[in-house]
Image (cartoon, grey):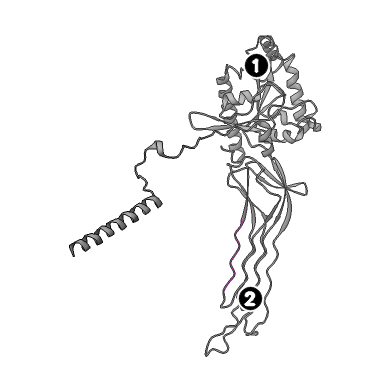
Amino acid sequence: MAGAASRVSGLACGTWDLLARRVASARPVRSLFASGALCGKPREVRKKNALSEKKLTRHFIDHRKVKVVAGSGGDGACTFHSEPRKEWGGPDGGNGGNGGNIIIKVDRQVKSLSLVTALYHGGNGESGGSKNCYGRNAHNTYISVPIGTIVREFGKTVADLSQHGQEYVAAYGGAGGKGNRFFLSNENRAPMISTPGEKGQERALQLELRTMAHAGLVGFPNAGKSSLLRAISNAKPAVAAYPFTTLNPHVGIVKYRDHEQVAVADIPGLIQGAHLNHGLGISFLRHIERCRFLLFVLDLSAAEPWVQLENLRFELDQYEPGLSQRPQAIVANKVDLPEARANLDTLRALVTQRVIPVSAVTGHNTEELILHLRELYDGYLLSEGCSGQQPVKW
């Protein structure tokens, strides 16, 4: 008996050992405290390459044609109350819900019209139901646009959106239909009529972006406007030694110790005949129209830089009479070059406005430009306050 028991126990132990080996081979045990060397390889974090100016231009859109179709209202219901032991319950058809409006809203985080699509459809309201249940109103559809967007219809300006959070209802949704409960009266105790929902408004609009900035850098190509904007603000426009480096406007913010902020726009370079749509043409002349004061940037190393000033003023006045007479300053750039020093005295003798010699490359005398920029900004705030208008804040 003892030998049989020992054989049975030995067989059981062998069976358990076999099962343990099979489990170990099928499901390997993993250590919960694996070192970093045994873990997976760390993913390499690749830095995204900065978009070139040409690629940025593809995403910068300053005008759009948009068709907006608001939502239609829901139909009213024609039903009668049905309940046990209440044979004549009466009409209980509810009204339909209103269609959704399409609203254009200004968002300071949006800088271009590139995200605006060509067609917008509003949501339709729900139809009414029995038991006096009204249909649900549709939600409004919002179109986010940058500050300084103008809405036109048939060439006429219908809205000028210049403040953050400002809204304009581009298309109104249709009203919901009336249920037969609405038509209940003493003369008609069992109305059998209901009205359908109205269609939403449909419009074709043109959105036009005009850069909204306090100051505008105006000058011919390769005058150093982009370099100057990089020197005085937080903007990082492309800079290169060839004309038309800037293909779309850039806006930089100049911050002061009292937490005041002044927006400065780098307008792409103009050429002679820009008011006739030569070069970049009128598409960027309209951005200057939105600036409260101007900074004429002249290449002081060029021959006769005062002729550049006359040509710039002529182009602005041809586009809009009196545009060149806004509060301004003359910025004589590239004063670090030897050929520019002789032209500085001649320029000051020929003009009556203040001339600020600077070097955008070395940063020479940029403090004087920043201080004068604040003087122009304070004068703008004073003039807007006297006229009762609300100044634009950044």
Note whether 273 is above or below 25 in the view shown: above
Which x, y percent locates residue 114?
A: 67, 43
Quadrant for residue 56, please give it: top right
Residue 223 forms part of the magenta stretch: no
Which x, y percent locates residue 338?
A: 66, 9
Residue situated in front as seen by the camera: 18 or 143: 18
Note whether 179 is above or below 217 in the view shown: below
Report whether 237 appears left or right of 26.
right
**Helix, strand or loop status at disc 1:** loop
Task: Give the magenta part as a residue range.
Answer: 133-140
Which x, y percent locates residue 163?
A: 60, 43
Which x, y percent locates residue 21?
A: 35, 52
> Callout 1: 10 Å neighbours few (<14), some, many (20+)?
many
Quadrant (top left, top right, bottom left, bottom right) of the C terminus: top right
Quadrant for residue 88, please give it: bottom right
Residue 136 forms part of the magenta stretch: yes
The rendered magenta stretch, by its main secondary structure, is classed as loop
* Numbered badge on residue 44: none
Note whether 333 is above or below 142 in the view shown: above
* Residue indicated by mark 1: 334
**Helix, strand or loop status at disc 2:** loop
Quadrant for residue 215, please give it: top right
Q: Residue at x 25, y 57 (%)?
A: 10
State whether residue 258 appears in this view: yes
* Numbered badge on residue 77: 2
Amino acid carrying mark 1 in the image: Lys
State the separation of the CA atoms marked 2 and 1. 76 Å
Q: Residue at x 68, y 79 (%)?
A: 193
Quadrant (top left, top right, bottom left, bottom right) of the N terminus: bottom left
Amino acid carrying mark 2 in the image: Ala
The answer to the question of whether label 2 and label 1 lie on touching residues, with beta carbons closer than 8 A, is no
In the rendered structure, which disc, 2 or 1, sits on the residue that comes first in sequence?
Answer: 2
